[in-house]
Image: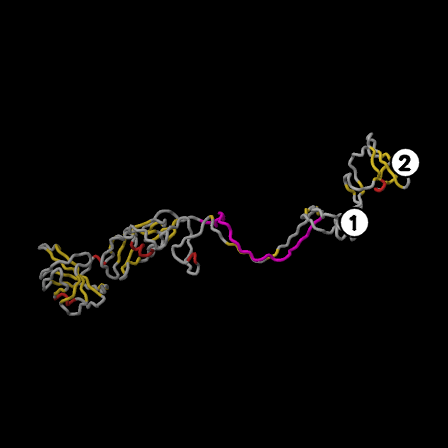
Amino acid sequence: MANELRVRADFVAGGLTTAITAADTTMASPGLIDLPPIGSSEFAAVALFRTDLTGRVIKKEIVWILDHVVGASSATIVRGREGTTPQAWDVGDRWSHTQTARDIVVIATSGTRPPNPHIGLEVYEVDTGAKRVWDGTAWQIQGGMPVGTVIWKASNIQPLGYLRCNGALVDRTTYADLFAEIGFTWSPVPGTDPGSNQFYLPNTPGKTFVDLDATQTEFNAVGKNGGSKASTAPHTHSLSAHGHTITVAGNNFNTDERDTNHAHNVYTRNQDTGGQSANHGHQARTDTRQPDQGWPAAGHLGFRTTDRTPEMLYGGWGVQGVCHLSNNSVYQDHSHNFNHDHPSTNYQSEAPWAGNWKHVHNANHGHTASSGGASPDVTGASSAAATSGNLQPYTTMVAFIKF
C-alpha cells in the first residue's frame, strides 16, 4: 500500500455510530472530526475494542484510517492490521487513536519480523543482535554492518548475526536477507542453484581476498576462485634480447674432431717419434773395430740376430761389414729422429698427409672469449610439473559473513 507514513495524535477517541461487518472498509463516529488530516501517503492507527462491565478489554482490532479530511466524521479504513483479525462491530463499540506496540521498538527475531510494516518501524532482532528499520522496501540495519559484510576475527568464536565463511549450504528461508544479497554467487559453479531451498556461503578458509577488477579476467566477477599455494599450472616466461660476456681461462681443452685439411704451425722438423716400424736413421755406436759413425737410412742392409747379438749389416760408400750396436737388444723400444711433417696445407707449401686422418687436438693454451652478439627474444611455456613457491609472511584469522 502507498499509505506508509504513520500519523500520530493525542487523546482522539470515540464510539461507533453505525455497525460494521468484518468486510466493511469504512467507519463512522463523531470522534473522527478531531483527527488531523491524513494524506494519500499517510495513515493513522486506530484500535477498535469492546469491554465488559468491569472495563476489561474482551475484543480488539486495529484498523488503519486513510485519506482523512479535516472535520469528516467518517473515514476509509484498512482492516485487521498489526497482527489482528477483522471482526464485526456494534454501535457503541469504542475506538481510540492511541499508541500501539509498533510505535516503539519491536522485539522479534530475524524470522518473525512484523508483517505489513510501516515506514520507520523499528525492530530489534534477538537472534542476530541487529536493529532494523523498514524503509518502505526492505529491512535496513541501523548503525550496524550491512547484510553480506565479511569481517575478520582474531578468534574462531562466531559472533551474533554472522555465519562462518566455510562454503556451507544454508537454508534460503532462514537466511532470506543474506540469500537476497548474495544469491548463488558462491556456488562451486557460480550461479548454479543447488536445490533443496539452499544456497552456498562464501568459502574462504586458506584463501586471501582480491578486490573486484572488471578489467582483468581473473578478477572480473564476485565469487571467482584461483591461485595455488604450490602452482602446477603451465605458465609462460619471456626474456628480452640480451648479450653474454664469457671469459674462459685455463688450458688443456680438447677441441673437436676434424677430418679435413687444415693448418698447423710446426716449427721444428725431425721431432722425436716412437715405435720401430717407421723409416728412420740410427745413430749407433760400434765396437772397437769400427769408429763411431752415423748411419743414414739408405745404408741399412738388415739385422743379424741369430745369436741375439745386436749386429747390423751395413754398406755404402764402398765399405761393408758388421756393426755391433750399443743397445742391449734389437727388440727394445727406442726413439728415432724421424723426419716428417704433420698433415698441413700451408707449412712450407708441402702437400698434406695422405688420408687426412681424424684426430683430436689437445690445445694447451687459454681462451678469452667475449660476447658474439645478443640472443633473440625468447618466450616459452613451462611444463605442468609442480613448482613450489615461498609464501609471503602471513597471519591466520577467521572470516564471518553478516546475515
Q: Secondary structure at mark 1?
A: loop
Query: Vertical placement of 260 versus 66: above or below?
Result: above
Q: Which residue is mark 2?
A: 290
Secondary structure state at the residue bearing disc 2: loop
Taking the spot 31% from the left edge, 54% from the top edge, the residue there is 179
At horizontal 43% and vertical 61% (from top left) the residue drawn is: 215
Disc nearer the start of the sequence (2/1): 1
Q: Residue at point 18% right, 60% down?
A: 98
Task: Residue 382: give x, y in percent of width and height.
Answer: 51, 51
> What amino acid type should be assigned to the residue bearing mark 1?
Tyr
Residue 144 seen in the figure: no
The question of residue 319 being in magenta is answered with: no
Image quarter for residue 70?
A: bottom left
Q: Is residue 292 visible?
A: yes
Count of labels in the image? 2
Location of residue 238 in the rendering, given as x and y in whole percent from the top left corner: 53, 56
Q: Residues within 10 Å of mark 2 (few under 14, many from 20)?
A: few
| Front in this rendered view, residue 57 or 349 | 349
Q: Which residues are magenta?
A: 365-394
Who is closer to the viewer here, 202 or 101? Answer: 202
Q: Nearer the viewer, residue 321 or 122?
A: 321
Provide the residue designation for mark 1.
267
User: Which amino acid is tagged 2?
Assistant: Gln
Q: x and y percent of residue 377 in the render? A: 56, 57
User: What x and y, as percent, mark residue 143?
Assistant: 32, 57
Label 1 crowding class (10 Å Cα cut-off): few <14, some 14-19, many 20+? few
Identify the mark at residue 302; answer none if there is no mark: none
Left of 236 or right of it: where is 355? right
